[in-house]
Amino acid sequence: TTDVSLVDLNSAADHKDDFKAQRQKFLDQTNLTSSHYEFVGRTLTYLGDYCAKRRLSVPLKVAWHKLKETGMIPRENCISTYLYVLSLDDTSDLSSEVAAFHDLVYEPNEKTVSLRVKSLVGKGD
């Protein structure tokens, strides 16, 4: 495995620069080409679609961490798919993390705000 630090989703800094730096670090450490990197992105998107059709959350728990490791900013529909599948597993805090990621990169929506509020209420914050 590679030792790639993950993008901090909670910092208030310019996130686009964080993602670009994470992407470059990932590419440097894995020696992937840009074409390979794009293929990884498509594969993680297809995995999300596959898991959504079968309501499988466990593979997406791993895929979500890999997606962060790559520094990738997937399309909004990909994040929405991950959010849908991960929110099926009520024991997972990942859905609130995916919602926060969505809200950092794209415009917050009713679903993401609702999930984040539920998560905070559940933690007592």
Image (spheres, rainbow, N blue to C red):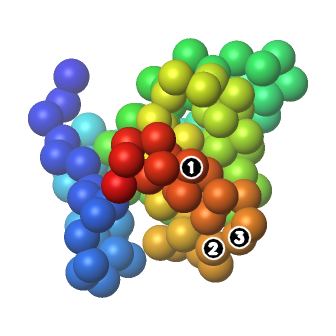
Position of 24 relative to 124 (above/below):
below
The x, y position of residue 125, in whole percent, is 35, 55
Quadrant hosting residue 55: top right
Which numbered disc flags the more N-terminal residue, 1 or 2?
2
Whether pointer 3 and pointer 2 mark residues with C-beta atoms closer than 8 Å, the reply is yes
Q: CA distance from mark 3 to mark 2?
A: 4 Å
Say which residue appears at 69% left-offset and 62% top-offset: 76
Q: Secondary structure at mark 2?
A: loop
Whether residue 24 is visible, yes or no, is no
Residue at the extreme bottom of the image, as rendered: 14
Which residue type does callout 3 highlight?
Asn
Per the image, the residue denoted by label 1 is: 118
Which residue type does callout 1 highlight?
Lys
Q: How many marks?
A: 3
Say which residue appears at 63% left-offset and 73% top-offset: 108
Q: Is residue 109 left or right of residue 97?
A: right
Say which residue appears at 45% left-offset and 24% top-offset: 62
The x, y position of residue 77, in whole percent, is 75, 56
The x, y position of residue 23, in whole percent, is 32, 58
Q: Is residue 76 left or right of residue 25?
A: right
**Image disc number at residue 108:** 2
Q: Nearer the viewer, mark 3 or mark 1?
A: 1
Q: Secondary structure at mark 1?
A: helix
Q: Nearer the viewer, residue 19 or 35?
A: 19
Position of 94 relative to 124 (above/below):
above
Residues packed near mark 3 inside 10 Å, few (<14), some (14 to 19) or many (20 plus): few
Per the image, the residue denoted by label 3 is: 109
